Amino acid sequence: MEKKQIDWSNIGFGYMQTEKRYVSNYKNGAWDDGVLTEDANIVLNECAGVLQYAQTVFEGLKAYTAEDGRIVMFRPDLNAERMMNSAKRLEMPPFPAERFLDAVKKVVKANEAYVPPYGSGASLYIRPYMFGSNPVIGVKPADEYQFRAFTTPVGPYFKGGAKPLTIKVSDFDRAAPHGTGNIKAGLNYAMSLHAIVTAHEEGYAENMYLDPGTRTKVEETGGANFLFVTKDNKVVTPKSDSILPSITRRSLVYVAQHYLGLEVEEREVLFSEVKDFAECGLCGTAAVISPVGKIVDHGNEICFPSGMDEMGPTIKKLYDTLTGIQMGHLEAPEGWVVEV
Ligand code: PLP
Ligand code: COI
């Protein structure tokens, strides 16, 4: 299999159409067998549930070339499980976890020529998603659904790679108390578009959202969870019912405790204590761990001691250990690295 001629080290986080995608349809109460297709377009009825009432959920995970040359994915079982939870919350029929794993493996294999080589810093992003496909006009769930998974080669989510980011405290909320902030539903991202455009126009890389109920606690950004490091080297990460349960964050908590011997606190984090932390990072599949150097809250600047030039020392250790596990330099916990 010949790799595509792509300048792997210089691609950003964008959509590049690859050859095959996986499709399965749900009708009369059952999912069909699913196929790979070359057709990247979808034809839908004008009244499809997804178009009218945003009935859609998705996932994001990466396939990449490990040091030994194998193509692997990181903890895809957790994406499968989270997508089932997201679907249930939006009254959609969950796509079974074993089908999900089979679909993502098939779509990566079919697009192997687009899996970036080891050491390029790029990966093949996999976007599984599903949506209500039949006409719905009264407010109710659709009866028919489509699951799809496509791939696109990607580089770093934030321009500048590992350079510390400046973010702002948003005036908007991305989730509601008891809402859908803890699932990966398209509607949460539609909610965040005005906030992200506003932040970018003002020169910020991302938003820090506070809890929608009291606006006193740290939640997450539009596409990643927060990790903080205290001055006495504890890792602190916000716990909230309205943030996405990030697979990267859950993995980093384990890495901090079991590989680095660090103390970890998963708890409510008041915004008022953020100024006392030594380091801050954003973690997610796309973000990996992106360091934050500065947070601006209505003109008041919080500048972390780790500065604007490089990652703080503990975030760097977490980053090196996590990526070491992913790439195969370090032994992975059972089941974390799955061969395609
Ligand atoms: N939070 C939000 C809102 C996200 O969109 C993502 C991306 O998936 C994350 C956090 C990070 O989650 P994960 O580490 O599972 O990719
Ligand atoms: C991911 O990290 O996979 C996501 O889905 C985040 C998205 C904002 C690109």
Image: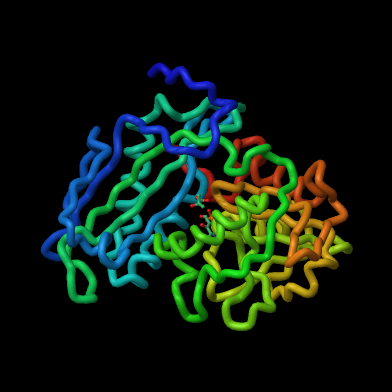
* Quadrant assignment for the C terminus: top left
Q: Residue furthest left?
A: 28
Above or below, 40 against 52 in this view is above
Tag count:
0
The location of residue 207, given as percent across then percent down, is 63, 60
> Which residue is more in the foreground, 264 or 130?
130
Q: Quadrant of residue 29?
A: bottom left
Above or below, 282 against 321 in this view is below
Above or below, 156 against 101 in this view is above
**Residue at the (28%, 58%) spot, across then down:** 131
The location of residue 200, given as percent across then percent down, is 61, 51
Q: Quadrant of residue 97?
A: bottom left
Instruction: Specify whether 84 is left or right of 246.
Output: left
**Residue at the (38%, 18%) spot, across then down:** 1
**Residue at the (88%, 62%) spot, across then down:** 231
Look at the image and tell me whether residue 250 can be seen. Answer: no
Instruction: Specify whether 315 is left or right of 200.
Output: right
Q: Quadrant of residue 330?
A: top right
